[in-house]
Image: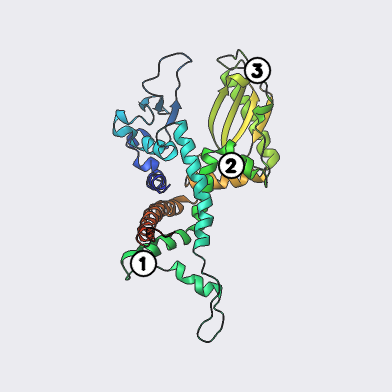
Amino acid sequence: MAGFLIIAGLTGALLVWYYELDANVHWMMLAPPDAHSPVRFFLSAKPGAPALPIDEVFVNPYTGQILGGRLWGDLSQGVSNLMPFVYRLHHSLALGTIGTWIFGLIALLWTLDCFVGAWLTFPPPRRRDARHRPRRFWTRWAKAWRIRWRAGGHKRTFDLHRASGLWPWALLLVFAWSGVALTLYDQVYRPTTGLFLSFQEDPLDTVPTRANPSPQPPIGWEPGYHAARQHLEALAQDRDLTIHALERFAYTPHKNALKLMARTSSDVNERFGETWVYVDATDGALLGHYLPTGEAAGNTVTTWLTSLHIAAVGGVGYRVVATVLGVAVIVLSATGVVVWWRKRGTARATKPISRPGKQ
């Protein structure tokens, strides 16, 4: 578990600055009026067709010029894919679905370990001081938050482990449980959280699946977009929302549905919007919507947890905090192994030796 968390802490500390560290930053830079707005196109091969040499393309939205492209996460293409590969390591150890499951289980264990670790820092049952007065719990617990820097050796390592788990405890729990949400959402997170909080239903769950879907929306892309935008504006007016940007428009053939993603005042994520409207791809009729906050408590909590996990709230200040937390996870994991190894060696050294004829 410590090994996985060291990888997660290191890669997570880097991913907080994904766009700044991405080697393809020159693709991201455009001439005025907007210096940071290339359009990203993600491509996929048709069923049965060979794999594509590139699947992410950067386009200047003002001229249509292709600025560059890459096979996302393929480190064999060189440094241009370093940060996407770091992302794959963080999310799935670059092993695909199996790696995602592994990290999900580690995140679940980490969540439980947050509570066990906190409990282990609590002081032993009450003892009396020289005046026979019971010492208060907080007075006795205070030493668990301190680090004896001058003690050196095992004492300093033990204090580092204990204190680095206590000071950022709330954030560690947020990152652990949100890690479950990002990897085992349907299997663990949604059923567990759903016991206490309500969730919005996916509008497409009630739409029948088509056996022979059309490869293009029957209504056409432009009419479908205008229909979705009208429904979004009506939703914003009804819910008193502000539309900040329209960011993604997609077609789901097997559901014959178009969906428009926008960033609105319902979003807390500063990096991308999560407000959706769904329309029928034949006649443009509204199928439903999704709001990241304000609609259902479960979705609101999940939105905040995942946005904190990817450091998409709080600006640069919180990104620095998330970076420091990544380093703290590394320290916590490494010192935990050292403490465990020392206790294991001590236990072996003090194990009683059985003698012949004695049980």
Give the residue number, with chain letter if any, for mark 3. Answer: 282
Give the amino acid at mark 3. Thr
Q: Classify residue 335 by image quadrant.
A: bottom left
Residue at the spot 41% in from the left edge and 35% down from the top edge: 88
Q: Are marks 3 and 2 in contact (CB under 8 Å)?
A: no
Q: Residue 208 sits in which quadrant?
A: top right
Q: Is residue 157 above or below residue 197?
A: below
The mark tally for this picture is 3
**Lateral position of residue 73 relative to residue 142, left or right:** left
**Quick check: 200 above or below 177?**
above
Q: Assign a secondary structure to mark 2.
A: helix
| Quadrant of res 344 | bottom left
Residue type, label 2:
Tyr
Measuring from the top left, give residue 269's x and y in whole percent. 53, 44
Q: CA distance from mark 1 to mark 2?
A: 38 Å
Mark 1 and mark 2 lie on one chain; the one further toward the N terminus is: 1
Q: Residue 239 placed where, x, y %?
A: 69, 41
Within 10 Å of the Cα at label 3, are there few (<14), some (14-19), or many (20+) other Cα atoms? some
Q: Give the mark toward the camera: 3 or 2.
A: 2
Instruction: Say few, some or many: other residues with alpha carbon within 10 Å of mark 2 (under 14 / 14 to 19 / 20 or more).
Output: some
Pointer 1 residue: 155
Q: Nearer the viewer, residue 215 or 139?
A: 139
Horizontal side of 262 relative to 195 (left or right) equals: left
Which of the two marks, 1 or 3, is nearer to us in this view?
1
Which of discs 1 and 2 lies nearer the camera? The answer is: 1
In terms of sequence position, does the residue under pointer 3 or pointer 2 come before the other? 2
Residue at 54%, 78% (x, y): give it: 135
Callout 1 touching callout 2 (CB < 8 Å): no
